[in-house]
Structures are given as C-alpha cells and as structure tokens.
Image (cartoon, coloured by chain):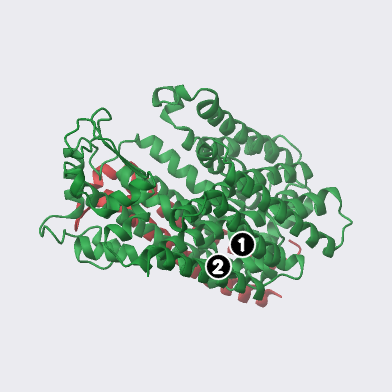
Amino acid sequence: MSIQSWTYLLVGLSFTLYIGVAYWARASSTGEFYIAGRGVSPLANGLATAADWMSAASFISMAGIIAFMGRDGSIYLMGWTGGYVLLALLLAPYLRKFGQFTVPDFVGARYYSNVARLVAVLCAIFVSFTYVAGQMRGVGIVFSRFLEVDINTGVVIGMAIVLVYAVLGGMKGITYTQVAQYCVLIFAYMVPAIFISMMMTGNPVPQLGFGSQLAAEPGIYLLDKLDGLSTALGFNAYTAGSKSTLDVLFITAALMVGTAGLPHVIVRFFTVPNVADARRSAGYALFFIVLLYTTAPAVAAFARANLLTTLPDSRYADAPAWVKTWEETSLIRFEDKNSDGRIQYTADTATNELTIDRDIMVLANPEIASLPNWVVALVAAGGLAAALSTAAGLLLVISTAVSHDLLKRVVMPAISEREELLYARLAATGAVILAGYFGINPPGFVAQVVAFAFGLAAASFFPVLVLGIFSRSATREGAIAGMISGLGLTTGYIVYFKFMNPAANLAEHWWFGISPEGIGTLGMLLNFAVMLLVSRFTPPPPSEVVALVEHIRLP
Amino acid sequence: MSNPDGDWASKRYWRTNLRYLVILLTLWAGVSFGCGILFVDLLDQIPLGGFKLGFWFAQQGAMVVFVVLIVVYVRLMNRLDDRFSAERGAAK
C-alpha cells in the first residue's frame, strides 16, 4: 500500500474513533459541558492533560528546534515540563477544592471583584486564541503534506471534526477523545524514535541511545561525534550553549510559570472527583508528557547526527531519496552556489547551500530510517491528534469564558442552565469558525505571539492565583494593580521589540540581556511585588474571603 | 476558626504542607535552574556514560526529577490528609 492510502486509512480510522468517543461521552448539562461532571478518573485526566498540552508544535517542531539549538533547546524541555511541578504543588489541589467551573471564577470570588474577573476573562480569551490559531494552521499543514490536499481544505476538515466533538461533547467529550488522541500521538512518536535509535546506536530506548556509542563506529559516543561534526562545519558544539546564562534562566522560568498559569491546563484539574485525585492526575499528566519530552532531544540528536554525516560535502546527485521528496515541499532547499555539484552545509550563510526546515526532523524521520509506509502515515495521524486535542481544549476555555464568565456571571445572571448550555455551544461554534478563519488567513504575527501567550500567563494569572491561595491578606486592589503592572511591563517590552522596533531586538538593547521571550519572568516578579505592596496599604479582604482561603487550604 | 481543636489540626496541616512545599520546590529549582542552567558548565566536566552531566540534566535529568517530585508530593500529602482527618475526627 502506498503512503497516501495508508495515511487516508489511519487518519480516517482515528477520526472515526474520536467522533465515536465524543458521541458516547456527549454532555447534557453545564457541569458536564464545563468540567465533565467532575467524574474523570485521575489516570484518564492525566492522559487527557498530556494530549491537551502537547500541541502540533510539540509533536512536529520541537525535536527539530532542539536539533538546531543544541543544548539551548533545554529551555523548551525544562520550561514546558517544570511548570507542572508548580501546578501540582501550588495550584491544582487548591483550585479543585474551590470547586467552581473556571479560573476567572476563582479570581472573581477570591478578589471579591468583577473587574478582576473581567481582566482574567480577557487574558484567558487572548491567550487561548493566540494558541488555537496556530493549531488550526498545524492541522492544515499536516493535511496538505501528507494527503496532498490544499492547506485551506485541511483547515476546514479539522474545523468540522473539532466542531462536532467540542460542541456536542463539551469537556466530557473532549476529555475522552483526548485520551484516545494521546494514545495515537505517543505511539506515532515512539515508533520512529525507537527504530532510529536502534539504527544509530543499537539501543532500542531512545533516552539511553542518546548517551550510547554509535553502532557504525563503536567506541565513539553519539554526542561526542555530534560535537565534532558541528564544530568542523563551523557550528557551535552541540552540547554547548550559545545563549547567555541569564537569558536561558529567564526564558525557562517564564515558560514554566506560564505553563502553570495557562487556563486550559488549569481547568483540566477541575474535572476530577476530589483534591487527592487532582494531585495524582498532575503526576500522571507530567509522566505522560515527559515520555515524549525526553524522547524529543534524543530524536533531535539522532536526526542531526544523521544529517551531518550524510549530507555535507556529498554529491547532490547521490543524495538520499528523502532529500528529493522533501525538496518538493520546499522544506529542504539546495542552491549550488559554487556549482560543484556537492552540498556545502556550513554555519557561514555566504557559502552555505542547504536550507532545512526544522519540522523535517520529525516528519522525515521514518523515511530517513527507511521505515515502512504505515509508519509515515502514523506520524501524520499523530500530528493531527496533537493539533486537534490542543485546539479542542482551548476552544472549550474560550466558549466557557463567554457563556459562563461573561454572560452568566456578569451580563445576564438570570439565564437558566439550559440557556447557558446553549450559549456555551454557540460560543464554541463561533470560536471554531474564528479559529478556522485565522488558520486560513494566518496573521503574520502568530509565531511572534506564542512567546507572548506564555509571558502573559506568567505575568498575569500565576501571581494572582498563588497569592490568592497562600496569602490571606492579598486584596482586590493589590490583585488588579499587580495584574495590570505585570501585563503592562510584559506587553510593552514584547510589543516594542517584536512589533515597533524589531531592528533593535538584539542582546545589547535588552534589559540585563533578557530577551522578549524571557520578560514574562520579570513581569511576574513585578506583579508579585506590586500586589504585596498595594495589599499592605489597602483595606483587608472581607471575612468571607478569608474564610474561603482557609477553606481551600484544607483537603 | 470557631472550633479550637479542629483549628489546631488545620494549622498543623497547613504548616506541614508548607514545609513539604519548601523542600520539594528547592529541589525543583536545584535540578532545573541549578544543575541544568547555572552550574551546567561546571557539571559538564563530569561524564555520565556518553553524556556530559550538565547537558544530561538540562535535556533529560531535570524532567525525570520533576516527575519524581510530584510522585513524592502525592504520597506525602495523602499520608498527611489521612493524619489530618484522623486528628480532626478525634477533636470532634
């Protein structure tokens, strides 16, 4: 069977599975629509959280980014996993104990203020939209590469699928489809990784193969070989960093704290039956995430080593078949600058003749390792699972923010549960259509605003949530002032360097050498400081709020 | 707050919880910010199989420790919850 028939088969089967699961788990009340009726087991929630968290970017792009960044790629690895420790220890159990539907619910109740709630709603919607547009685009790209349909057709198909199961199933439907999607995506990621690890090092466990000797050159470790190859071509040694230590520290911290503050992740912990299950499911979630995240850097090193041994200085005519295949999609570009028929691949842009898109590291892996066609198709199904599961989780946050936080809590509190559920479904539909629109007409700034989403979550939600739990005396005024100053600093810095004056986006212009990706950490610190300071000089919270804080601290 | 014995048990529960948090979060920062970032070049002098130790922490070890930290936290808190409900039950 050809790659394309396999892809149609596997993608079709997996989509049928998702729709079937969603039909079986459709929601019939607002409780089921928003938080799956609090009946999700910690294991299922852990699987769903992992699928929700790992987006098209984690699945398709991350290994490639690391392959080109070397050691500095650890900012994503540690940044996107370390936040779960904060989430498990500082937020999830207490917010579950609080026991309502959304993050803005908590902010509104703890800070006895609809203004604070509205700021939280706007942040939640902005962060989620930033993300979801990227996911829809990811769906379109996977479709167009593997099924040879137009990107826009791919986006529309993806929209239709998400629409069916998010609108029908709400959180309940999404949760159980995400469980299925995690299984598809982890299988699709691990199979090629195991094969390529065997091929390169003879060790079937990628995490161990990463630190093993090369099968082709016994006695030489993979990473030493990679360092040698990289430096010989003028690149940095693979295991050495090139970013400043302070910048790495700030970016990692911003990603960690941002992860812990993302509303679509937090809300997953509202779906389990009790506090102990919230803690347990955070552990499951991180385990399932780390399974992929420890494999990614291994895949990165294998792919990079493979690339650097086969391509540089080889004759273009003799290049392996996958080079030609991916040249057609223009993910690999070769330009024979000195017309010698050989591939020059160097760090020097003047003589470099090969341009490689980072996504290729995962997408072309099965072909590089000469794996059977069904594995290539599996990678397509896995990429789609990653993109769809994340998109669905985000759409739910958006629809909940509109129907529950805005309409029910602020604009028209008199509506019945049936009406609220209808509005939730309408909002989800609207959000899907808008997300699809952005997927088809991606605003040029999507890539730039991803850093923004994390910085924003770090600088706005995290301090407010943590102090809301761990301080009895944090006040409404403190929270609002803290959120505004944290957001203001982060937004201002990012907008200045990314949009107003991109030419100045260089280390020598940054404050203390902190890049816009890492500024969220400073925003978070400012938020904490302002909040503590303002809380000291404003009237203390009313006694029922103090009682609420006491209440959520106990199991 | 009205029930002095129950309140005492609650206070002790919260203080123990905070102690666990301080210890676990110190380890969390130690493996990631410490071993993986600040002291990475120093640790890179030490080989671990085919890895340099600092590099291993940055791309593998820190993440493994994160999982272990949550597992330890879950166990400690489950025990603490049991003790707390026993104490509070006795106070009533």
Disc 2 or 1, which lies upstream in sequence?
A: 2
Q: Secondary structure at mark 1?
A: helix
Marked residue chain, label 2: A
Marked residue chain, label 1: A
Location of residue B72 (image quadrant): bottom left
Labelled disc at residue A161: 1
Residue flagged by tag 2: what amino acid is it? Phe
Do discs 2 and 1 belong to a common subunit? yes
Q: CB under 8 Å between callouts 2 and 1?
A: yes
Q: Is residue B76 visible?
A: no
Residue flagged by tag 1: what amino acid is it? Ile
Which residue, given by chain and number where applicable, does mark 2 sit on? A15
| Mark 2 Cα shell of 10 Å, populated few (<14), some (14-19), many (≥20) | some
Residue A96 point in image, percent of width and height? 64, 62
In this view, the residue farthest toward the right is: A414
Residue A231 point in image, percent of width and height? 19, 39
Q: Secondary structure at mark 2?
A: helix
Q: Is residue A119 left or right of residue A197?
A: right
Q: Is residue A51 left or right of residue A344?
A: right
The letter of the red chain is B
Residue for point 71% across, 68% down: A32
Q: Is residue A379 above or below residue A337?
A: below
Residue A488 point in image, percent of width and height? 62, 31
Q: Is residue A296 left or right of residue A255?
A: left
Quadrant in which the C terminus of chain B appears: bottom right
| Mark 1 Cα shell of 10 Å, populated few (<14), some (14-19), many (≥20) | some
Quadrant in which the N terminus of chain B appears: bottom right
Near-viewer residue (A90 or A289): A289
